[in-house]
Image (cartoon, coloured by chain):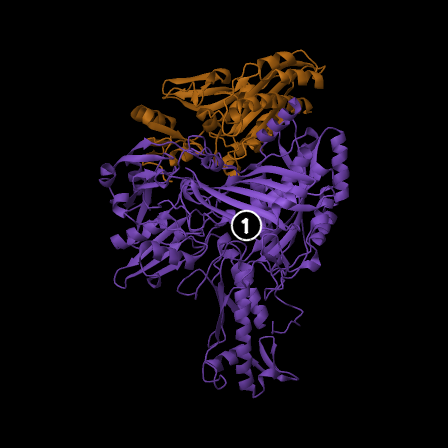
Chain colours: A orange, B purple
């Protein structure tokens, strides 16, 4: 199907984008990789008046380490993230996440920033970025601010982004102690979106005890869900199979997943525990 | 065949790469949407969002005033223009099927108004601006529910949801059941599937008001039948309609009939005197193209305590959807001829009942009733073995029709041509290392793992549904053209027919051009569906080639001043037997045949046509073995091994056959693992996009072992049987039996496909709860 008629702007700088956003307000949509936006437009689920294509603005993509922070530009594609040596070495769980998004075409065109800003409850990256305690650089004509992932995702397709702001970069802290990361996903057999997924970031001390755990679930609500019961059960513990199993059992505490035509609530609750266990096991098994 | 069979380098049976692939793989194909004509107009359709409703009003004013819009049509404009399906029984109920709704809609997606505009995008904008108000009516979506007393009516004006009933009975069924030691009972349902051609449906009509002709490019599996259907619906002479099937991107049965949009577009083109095109979006294809399966089977198998099958009762309830396309009522009838499968059961009662519901119409989809029939008898055989504590293979062997019994008249009154079911089973067991599989399963089961082995052995009819035509023409320069009525939509006809013709004429394959898919170029045709091309198109082509060779020999004899009886075929032409230096080429023969060189009393020219109908189907068979594992934590099913042994008689091109097996299997695994079109109780589709409806992908394909046995078809000039549906017919029941075997320690009797993870997880959980 064809989308409804729309205008198209291709600004060359952020300043131009800010001007266009002021001009068009909520009638405008920002276009990054387009792999969520364009299908929605073709199905006429969304009919923006104007698309503002961010693709010609320099400096919005790339991966670099700045001290104890990994900075990923918003327009960096999933393929670039999953293929990056830096990411693979420092945060293999993030590389794994980027490598299971959608399909090859989606990964080649889709961007980190686009996925985060779109905040689809079935998306992969918000889950892992929340586990990694990432924060998001939001830029506007007035300047910029950073918002932590825990605060950024507000609800289904809703984030802390204001209409005049652009997500320009993702900042991921790199702790001094060794941190093991992983991502485990049960994909929907049609869409490839998350039915249930889990990301784990486990910081270990010299003895192998877990000194900090972030375990986050996807697919169980409108936003990534911190499995705090699981995190608590891991903290201070050596990661034996028994400890992991007991911690994972608590993953579904307090979640309220919604049924869809594929999976009912009970199944999703059960998968939350199964995939939390798989993610923790995979993280613990990383060298 | 009268042609000599001595050539050691025969083309028949050779794995030759498909000659049609290079243009398709390099984007050089020409599909309907690639055909551009000056002055073309585009149609977009406003469709019902209600599954059953009276239309209170249609507001087209805003749409009609939009830029680029030529006109907007509703049912008031198209009137009685409608599709017509054949009456299969005198009592058959048939709802109206107007090209645009008249008063009431009976399914989501029913066309209400059509916008004709200068571009597709403008047409879609205008179609979206049409406003319809509805008065909702109650909805029925399930066929078994639709047939209950007092059920909601899918069509109020029909007064019933019942379409037709057919019965077939042989022997003394009641006596067989009365004397049985055991009766095995099962209720099964085949999921509703979407045909999902890569190319959605499409049509382009070009009217010629001066010559009073209509040229139609259609994505169709049978241009000649489509031409007749268009003529009937339009009331326009068949001989003034020219249907062209250009490259067609798959059909799988769903493109075997004409649709409302086809008739509508032709009508609009004739009315406006301009070319008009409509291409389905994927969403429209989901809502309007005939879907497959959706049959419920209630079955009973009577047995002696030692496992002899004594009698069979099957009641099929088929969901036809809201409207009847010409082929909609066909698939359920397969049970009438296939119910006993490969087994000697003479006391058989089959009843088919079909119902209308407020859902997308159903119709033939790869297998078209065969997968349901195979599933029915093969699940029954497995469950019967379990009930009796017998080995499922032993029970099957005990009941097989034996090789010396062919041709064999079954308990439903059809004659199987040939078969050796134990041979294909034994080959499948050998290739799968079956004893080792069973040991592995038992060891895994000891460890508490859910592992199962399943077998299906099956028959599959191919090649019925009327005649097929074939012609071979040799022009003045000796150029050879094959004209086939079996129009290709991806099967590889251009390769295989060239192979067959070149083999029979003893010429290089490159010298043969194959023409199909054009009602002016081709004499007549029925089309490609139901695994029929090799059997019917091949039979017609071989018959025509035989006639051509006979005539050419007479011309050659005349040229060489020899007796026709002494003329033999040699590579590239003919020779006199015993005098190898006396030869003529096809070119010389063709030249002579067109220049007074035919013997006295024989017509000039070198062009032979055959209309082939053996009045019987070809009964291929096979044995499939599956090894599956189920993750009890998640319900995820993995097929660890799949062995397919198919016997399709003589193989014309092993590479093409293997591709057909792969494709059929992929779609069979779709049914077994993930595909199901779901409507909620309000009649709204829940799986109307590729985001919700799961099709199999390359990664779905399991480790695969393909084998074959060859039992030639004695009733076909090439000895062939069909293969296009082998994977869809045989593999899903093997997987189903393996899944049930894996779950048997939990006491689970039967689960319907598809075996999605949540469904298996729930079944396991409930069984463990006790």
| Position of residue B328 measured from the top left corner of the image (x, y, whole percent) | 45, 47
Describe the element under mark 1 as helix, strand or loop: strand
| Among the 4 quarters of the image, the one containing residue B238 | bottom left
| Among the 4 quarters of the image, the one containing residue A42 | top left
| Among the 4 quarters of the image, the one containing residue A33 | top left
Pointer 1 residue? B168
Q: In the picture provided, is A278 more to the left or to the right than B47?
A: right
| Position of residue A27 measured from the top left corner of the image (x, y, whole percent) | 32, 27
Residue situated in front as seen by the camera: A250 or B1: B1
**Can residue B702 be seen at all in this image of the molecule?**
no
Residue situated in front as seen by the camera: B132 or B44: B132
Q: Is residue A152 above or below residue B484?
A: above
Q: In the picture provided, is B675 more to the left or to the right than B361?
A: right
- The quadrant in which the N terminus of chain A is found is top left
* Disc 1 crowd, CA 10 A, few/some/many (<14, 14-19, 20+): some
**Can residue B503 be seen at all in this image of the molecule?**
yes
The residue depicted at 36 percent of the width and 46 percent of the height is B97
The residue depicted at 63 percent of the width and 18 percent of the height is A248
Chain of the residue where label 1 is placed in the rendered structure = B
Q: Is residue B223 above or below residue B144?
A: below
| Position of residue A48 measured from the top left corner of the image (x, y, whole percent) | 34, 30
Residue situated in front as seen by the camera: A110 or B501: B501
* Number of numbered tags placed on the structure image: 1
| Position of residue B404 measured from the top left corner of the image (x, y, whole percent) | 70, 60
């Amino acid at each position: 199907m064809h989308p409804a008629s729309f205008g198209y702007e291709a600004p060359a700088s952020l300043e131009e984008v800010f001007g266009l956003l002021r001009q068009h307000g909520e009638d405008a949509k920002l276009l990054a990789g387009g792999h969520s936006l364009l299908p929605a437009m073709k199905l006429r689920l969304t009919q923006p008046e104007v698309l503002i294509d961010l693709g010609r603005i320099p400096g919005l993509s790339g991966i670099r380490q700045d001290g104890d922070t990994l900075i990923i530009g918003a327009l960096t594609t999933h393929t670039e993230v999953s293929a990056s040596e830096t990411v693979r070495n420092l945060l293999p769980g993030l590389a794994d996440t980027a490598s299971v998004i959608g399909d090859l075409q989606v990964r080649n065109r889709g961007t980190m920033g686009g996925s985060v800003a779109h905040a689809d409850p079935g998306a992969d990256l918000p889950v892992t970025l929340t586990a990694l305690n990432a924060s998001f650089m939001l830029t506007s004509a007035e300047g910029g601010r950073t918002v932590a992932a825990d605060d950024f995702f507000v609800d289904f397709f809703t984030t802390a982004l204001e209409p005049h702001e652009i997500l320009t970069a993702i900042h991921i802290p790199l702790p001094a102690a060794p941190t093991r990361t992983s991502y485990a996903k049960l994909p929907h057999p049609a869409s490839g979106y998350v039915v249930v997924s889990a990301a784990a970031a486990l910081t270990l001390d010299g003895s192998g005890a877990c000194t900090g755990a972030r375990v986050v679930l996807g697919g169980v609500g409108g936003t990534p869900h911190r499995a705090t019961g699981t995190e608590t059960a891991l903290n201070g513990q050596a990661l034996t199979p028994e400890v992991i199993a007991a911690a994972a059992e608590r993953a579904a505490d307090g979640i309220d997943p919604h049924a869809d035509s594929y999976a009912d609530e009970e199944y999703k609750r059960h998968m939350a525990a199964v995939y939390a266990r798989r993610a923790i096991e995979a993280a613990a098994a990383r060298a | 065949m009268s042609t000599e069979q001595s050539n050691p380098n025969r083309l028949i049976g050779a794995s030759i790469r498909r000659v049609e692939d290079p243009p398709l793989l390099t984007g050089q194909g020409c599909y309907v949407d690639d055909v551009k004509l000056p002055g073309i107009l585009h149609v977009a359709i406003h469709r019902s969002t209600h599954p059953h409703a009276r239309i209170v009003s249609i507001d087209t004013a805003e749409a009609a005033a939009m830029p680029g819009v030529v006109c907007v049509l509703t049912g008031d404009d198209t009137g009685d223009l409608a599709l017509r399906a054949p009456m299969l029984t005198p009592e058959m109920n048939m709802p109206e099927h107007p090209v645009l709704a008249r008063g009431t809609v009976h399914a989501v997606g029913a066309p209400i108004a059509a916008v004709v505009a200068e571009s597709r995008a403008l047409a879609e904008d205008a179609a979206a601006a049409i406003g319809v108000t509805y008065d909702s009516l109650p909805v029925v979506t399930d066929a078994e529910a639709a047939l209950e007393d007092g059920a909601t009516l899918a069509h109020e004006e029909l007064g019933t949801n019942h379409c037709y009933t057919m019965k077939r009975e042989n022997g003394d069924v009641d006596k067989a059941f009365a004397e049985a030691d055991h009766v095995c009972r099962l209720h099964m349902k085949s999921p509703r599937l979407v045909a999902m051609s890569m190319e959605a449906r499409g049509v382009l009509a070009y009217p010629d008001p001066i010559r009073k002709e209509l040229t139609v490019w259609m994505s169709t599996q049978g241009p000649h039948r489509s031409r007749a259907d268009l003529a009937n619906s339009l009331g326009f002479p068949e001989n003034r309609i020219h249907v062209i099937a250009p490259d067609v991107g798959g059909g799988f049965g769903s493109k075997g009939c004409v649709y409302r949009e086809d008739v509508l577009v032709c009508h609009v083109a004739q009315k406006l005197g301009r070319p008009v095109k409509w291409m389905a979006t994927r969403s429209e294809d989901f809502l309007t193209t005939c879907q497959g399966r959706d049959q419920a089977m209630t079955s009973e198998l009577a047995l002696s305590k030692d496992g002899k099958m004594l009698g069979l009762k099957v009641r099929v309830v088929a969901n036809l959807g809201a409207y009847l396309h010409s082929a909609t009522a066909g698939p359920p009838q397969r049970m009438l001829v296939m119910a006993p499968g490969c087994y000697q059961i003479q006391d058989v009662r089959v009843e088919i009942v079909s119902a209308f519901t407020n859902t997308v119409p159903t119709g033939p989809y790869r297998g078209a009733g065969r997968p349901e029939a195979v599933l029915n008898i093969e699940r029954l055989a497995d469950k019967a073995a379990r009930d009796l504590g017998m080995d499922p293979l032993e029970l099957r062997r005990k009941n097989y029709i034996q090789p010396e019994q062919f041709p064999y008249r079954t308990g439903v009154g059809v004659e199987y041509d040939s078969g050796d079911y134990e041979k294909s089973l034994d080959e499948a067991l050998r290739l799968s290392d079956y004893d080792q599989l069973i040991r592995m399963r038992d060891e895994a089961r000891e460890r508490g793992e859910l592992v199962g082995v399943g077998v299906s052995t099956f028959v599959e009819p191919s090649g019925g549904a009327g005649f097929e035509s074939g012609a071979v023409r040799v022009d003045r320069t000796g150029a050879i053209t094959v004209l086939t009525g079996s129009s290709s939509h991806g099967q590889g006809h251009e390769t295989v027919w060239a192979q067959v013709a070149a083999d029979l004429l003893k010429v290089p394959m490159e010298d043969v051009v194959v023409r199909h898919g054009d009602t002016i170029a081709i004499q007549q045709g029925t089309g490609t569906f139901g695994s029929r091309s090799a059997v019917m198109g091949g039979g017609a082509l071989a018959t025509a080639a035989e006639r051509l060779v006979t005539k050419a020999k007479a011309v050659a004899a005349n040229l060489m001043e020899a007796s026709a009886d002494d003329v033999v075929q040699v590579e590239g032409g003919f020779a006199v037997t015993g005098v190898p230096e006396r030869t003529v080429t096809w070119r010389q023969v063709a030249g002579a045949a067109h220049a007074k060189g035919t013997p006295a009393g024989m017509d000039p020219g070198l062009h032979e046509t055959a209309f082939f109908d053996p009045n019987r189907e070809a009964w291929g068979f096979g044995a499939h073995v599956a090894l599956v594992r189920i993750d009890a934590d998640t319900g995820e099913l993995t097929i660890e091994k799949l062995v397919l042994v198919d016997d399709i008689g003589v193989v014309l091109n092993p590479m093409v056959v293997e591709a057909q097996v792969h494709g059929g299997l992929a779609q069979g695994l779709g049914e077994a693992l993930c595909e199901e079109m779901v409507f909620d109780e309000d009649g709204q589709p829940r799986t109307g996009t590729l985001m919700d409806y799961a099709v199999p992908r390359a990664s779905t394909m399991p480790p695969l072992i393909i084998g074959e046995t060859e039992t030639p078809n004695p009733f076909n000039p090439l000895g062939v049987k069909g293969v296009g549906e082998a994977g869809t017919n045989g593999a899903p029941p093997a997987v189903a039996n393996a899944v049930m075997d894996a779950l048997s320690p939990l006491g689970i009797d039967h689960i319907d496909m598809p075996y999605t993870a949540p469904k298996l997880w729930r079944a396991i959980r409930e069984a463990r709860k006790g």
